[in-house]
Image (cartoon, rainbow, N blue to C red):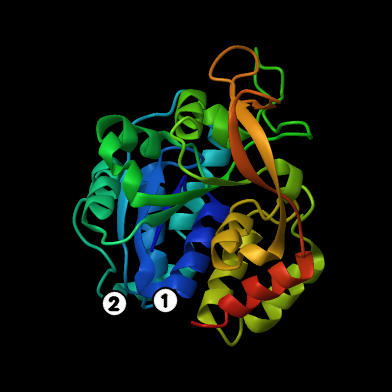
Amino acid sequence: MIIHDNDGHVDDLLSSLLLWLHFKNNLQAISVTDGDCYVQQAYESLVKMATFLDLEGPEIGISEEPIPNPFPDNWRRESYIINELPIFSENALKRPYQVGKPRKSELLIADCLSHSKEPITIVATGPLTNLARVLQHKPELKSKIKEFIIMGGAINVRGNVEQPNHDGSAEWNFYGDPPSAKAIFDTGIPIILIPLDVTNQVPINKEFLEKLEEQSSRYRASLLAAKLYSLVKGLNYYFWDTLTAAAAIEPNLFVYKDMRLDVSAQGKNAGKTMTSLFGGRKIKVAISLDKEKFENLFLKTLQTK
């Protein structure tokens, strides 16, 4: 059983798609944080994607509450472009995947956990705001979570935050809401971490996009993925969140190392992932992967619809 909590950018939407296509009815919910997106636009995009592909399954919820450190507006504006992609024009002839006002993420996640008969894996590819709030208000739900698989952190590489009054040591998901990242670390729930250290090893290259384009004439999911990636072509874009989805689908793609880690909750290094010999939490950290097998898994999954 899977819940996907994300923040609505291109790679978040594609990681939702991978989890949706692979786990089908075992994907219990998708929740969207107002992070690297404008959340209402990201929600509508997910509904349009599901409608376009005739998908079934999870309820989609959103959180409209701002995170402590908002992502840059020029990144978030991508949500409007995605939501207006011409590929969705045929949806006018279909019944929308989900209608009505979406439930709040915190309520949706808590409801899924409360009613699940087995522990749920939570895949998190955005700031950890929603998840920290759920466990703050309902700490008894900790027992319903099998593990977190999290895209976040920068351990032995430089972070990707370039903001005034910050030293650049943090990765954006953790910097977006440092106290929530620390709170999730402090829960004691098992964590598999997909940090920049491993995602830096897999930039999206021309060869992968050519393979995706080749199969997009035969598979609608591949066509949709190709359209989404066309929006970030030419940028320094990586398999951040899709790698994290792959860790839920096929954990053996990665080599892991146990590390004792903590997260700085404030100051000039807010969101920094810090190593410690004696403090912090023991975290299972992905340190390398089989890139070819990952790309093959990605492309093959997009051939299922």
Per the image, label 1 sits on a secondary structure element best described as loop
- Label 2: which secondary element: loop
Q: Residue at x 39, y 29 (%)?
A: 66
66 versus 250 height, above or below? above
Q: Is residue 51 visible?
A: no
- Are discs 2 and 1 less than 8 Å apart at CB? no
Q: Which residue is mark 1?
A: 53
For the residue pair 92 and 286, the one nearer the viewer reads as 286
Q: Residue at x 56, y 54 (%)?
A: 10
Residue occupying the far left of the picture: 100
Q: What residue is at 60 percent from the left and 68 percent from the top?
A: 250
Count of numbered marks: 2
Q: What residue type is disc 2 on?
A: Lys
- Where does the image place residue 56, in percent across and percent down from the top left? 32, 74
Quarter of the image where one finds residue 58: bottom left
Q: Which residue is mark 2?
A: 94
- Answer above or below: position of 132 versus 203: above
